[in-house]
Amino acid sequence: MTTFHRTVESYKQGAHTMPGEYYTSPDILAEEQERIFARHWNCVGRASQIPRNGDYIVRTVAGESLIILRDRDGELRALFNVCRHRGTRICRESSGQFSETIQCPYHAWTYTTDGRLIGAPHMQEVEGFDKREFPLH
């Protein structure tokens, strides 16, 4: 366990904080997001927050909105909160429950809780369209 040390006990003569740009620079933030958050596991919540199949929470990690859910088989999954059709945000609430499917509010593209596209209105008219090529990531 980490021990807390009061500043008066741990201060080293001549020590300084980092330059202000490390706290405010968009370039440094982008680098930190790429090198820290985009390459490693990130805690977004506890499994107990989504105990039942279909339960979900929405979190933002490294600027990306994610749906963390328990799928129909009880497995935990994380999917980008973006419809593959027009890039619409799928979930607007921070938590909730899906019935059997996930549906985009814009054009009603419908996905299973494991991310497979199962409904794409009017796309049957598009030559060569294959639902298997458009799952949620």
Image (cartoon, rainbow, N blue to C red):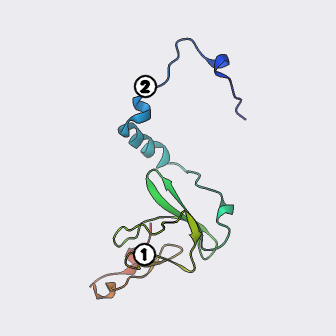
- Where residue 73 sits in the image (x, y, percent)? 62, 75
Q: Residue at x 32, y 81 (%)?
A: 129
**On screen, residue 86 above or below 21:** below
Q: CA distance from mark 1 to mark 2?
A: 45 Å
The reply to whether residue 69 is in sight is no
Give the secondary structure at mark 1: loop
Give the secondary structure at mark 2: loop
Q: Tell how many labels.
A: 2
- Mark sitting on residue 19: 2
Q: Residue at x 60, y 74 (%)?
A: 54
- Mark sitting on residue 105: 1
Q: The N terminus lies in which quarter of the figure?
A: top right
**On screen, residue 18 above or below 32:** above
**On screen, residue 39 above or below 128:** above
Camera-side residue of 30 and 24? 24
Question: What is the crowding at mark 1: few (fewer than 14 residues within 10 Å), some, or many (at least 20)?
Answer: some
Amino acid, disc 1: Pro
Q: Residue at x 59, y 52 (%)?
A: 43
Q: Residue furthest left?
A: 127
**On screen, residue 115 above or below 39:** below
Q: The C terminus lies in which quarter of the figure?
A: bottom left
Sequence-first disc among 1 and 2: 2
Amino acid, disc 2: Pro
